[in-house]
Image (cartoon, helix red, strand yellow):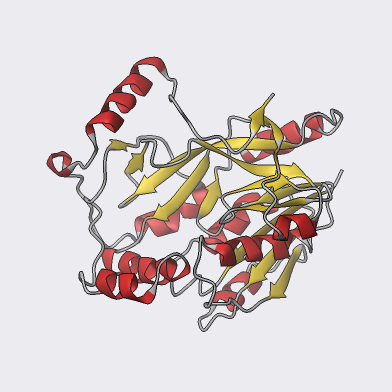
Amino acid sequence: MKLSGYTYVRNGIEMDYPVVESIKSVLSICDEFIVVLGDSQDATREEIEGINSDKIKIVDTVWDFSKREGGVVFAEQANIGLDHVSGDWVFHIQADEVIHEDDINKIKESIIEFDSDPKIQGVILPYYHFWGGYNYIRTTRKVHRNEVRLFRNLKGIRSYRDSQGFRLFSSVDNYLKGETGKKLKVKKVDAPMFHYKRVRPPEKMKQKMNMFFRFYRDDKWIKKYEEKGNTYDYNNVDILEEFHKSHPAVMQKRIDNQDWEFVYDKSKQKMKFKYRILYVFEKLTGYRLFEYKNYKLI
């Protein structure tokens, strides 16, 4: 059994993505690792090449900024990666996602176990969504609890929507024509994905979001957003919880070098009444009502 890993990134260093840490966190269990590298103007290529692994292959791409609807560019980059992997199983890890060293072998052992059961098409992993720094996580229904990150290299699997997850389509042509596809049949492995999407200095975070929204919003909306200031307000959030567990070792240098401080102000919580009720119910029961799931758990 061969396991292929892959990611996509553009200007990862300028945008302060932990892409090198991300790759390193899973490289040991991958037989190959594809990096779909967008047309960057920073040192992203040099940093990735500096990992110095013959498992890594870089595929160069150009991002189309004219495509402004639903993050389609991200899906395109994810699909380019799919077209270059050669393994029996695929591990898609995004440039701000990291696996803890205590869990990496658990993932590999699970894939070896699942490989003999053709009914299992993929694997979902639970998520820690960090916010503002390394001490808080967002746990409300505004973030996904689990997502497909490993799956069989089946013909017809494509990135779904903006590359959050994956589905099985009857053909690539039908995928491009708008077919909804079939949700993958998956097992869950308790190996949390550490998601550092909202962990940067406030100025860097605002810079990153200015770029990010260009793939979802029109110029008028973006102009208004940019005029709101040069720093990101991390207290513009619903509910955060403190995080007391250990981070992946590959992230320790970033944690030690953190040069900003975020203090969560609970008085600024923004959550509609109905979502607050649902949140309380989830905390009491462990069950998330009306949860969106881009997979079928078996």
Residue 160 seen in the current view = yes
In the image, residue 193 above or below residue 31: above
Left or right relative to 95: residue 226: left
Q: Quadrant of residue 84?
A: bottom right
Q: Residue at x 55, y 75 (%)?
A: 44
Residue 188 seen in the current view = no
Q: Quadrant of residue 227?
A: bottom left
In the image, residue 70 above or below residue 270: below
Q: Give how far across and how far down residue 222 sits, in percent.
A: 33, 72
Q: Residue at x 79, y 53 (%)?
A: 31
Q: Give how far across and how far down residue 161 sits, in percent.
A: 58, 53
Q: Give how far across and how far down residue 127 sits, in percent.
A: 49, 39
Q: Residue at x 54, y 58 (%)?
A: 21
Residue situated in front as seen by the camera: 170 or 86: 170
Screen quadrant of the N terminus = top right
Left or right relative to 27: residue 191: left
Residue situated in front as seen by the camera: 169 or 46: 169
Left or right relative to 240: residue 163: right
Residue situated in front as seen by the camera: 249 or 34: 34
The number of numbered discs placed on residues in the rendered structure image is 0
